[in-house]
Image (tube, helix red, strand yellow):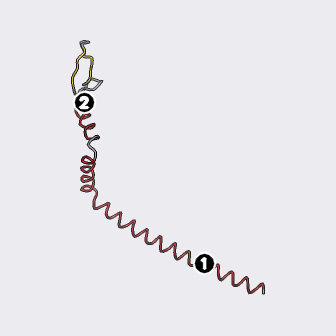
Amino acid sequence: MVVRKTVDGDVSKSPGTSARGSMDKMGDDFHAVGKGGVESGEHVDQIRDILFGAQRQDYERRFARLEELLVKNITELGNETTRKADKIGRAVSKKSI
């Protein structure tokens, strides 16, 4: 319950009004939803999935493919670096003998 001062200077108590004197029913609902916990979160997840589900799945596939390519390229780069380092090591040891 919020206490507010009316235009006439009287003080009134009314549920659902904010300190600014405007109806704040949506604000009360907002706080109730915020305390709703898992149930309200599930609803938001369902709405998000309906709106963006296909796009999200597409991006997940793209990111998975990019991750596979990145791992493959890093592995190949590491192997190539090792081969070249070994080749340089053998060349240096031949010249020093």
Q: Position of residue 12 (x, y in %)?
A: 23, 17
Q: Quadrant of residue 34?
A: top left
Q: CA distance from mark 2 to mark 1?
A: 68 Å
Image height of 97 relative to 13, above or below: below
Q: Earlier in the sequence, mark 2 or mark 1?
A: 2
Residue located at (52% from left, 77% from top):
76
Q: Position of residue 22 (x, y in %)?
A: 25, 26
Q: Amino acid at mark 1?
A: Thr
Q: Specify few, some or many for label 2: CA neighbours under 10 Å numbering under 14, 14-19, or 20 or more.
A: some
* Residue 91 as seen in the image, left or right of residue 26: right
Image quarter of the C terminus: bottom right
Q: Specify few, some or many for label 1: CA neighbours under 10 Å numbering under 14, 14-19, or 20 or more.
A: few
Which residue was labeled with disc 2? Answer: 24
Which element is circle 2 on? loop
* Residue 95 as seen in the image, left or right of residue 18: right
The circle drawn on residue 41 is none
Residue located at (56% from left, 75% from top):
78
Q: Amino acid at mark 2?
A: Asp
Q: 36 or 74: which is nearer to us?
A: 36
Q: 62 or 83: which is nearer to us?
A: 83
Image height of 44 relative to 18, above or below: below
Residue located at (24% from left, 52% from top):
47
Q: Position of residue 65 (x, y in %)?
A: 40, 70
The residue furthest top is: 9
Which element is circle 1 on? helix
Q: Position of residue 46 (x, y in %)?
A: 24, 53
Q: Quadrant of residue 27?
A: top left
Image quarter of the N terminus: top left
The circle drawn on residue 82 is 1
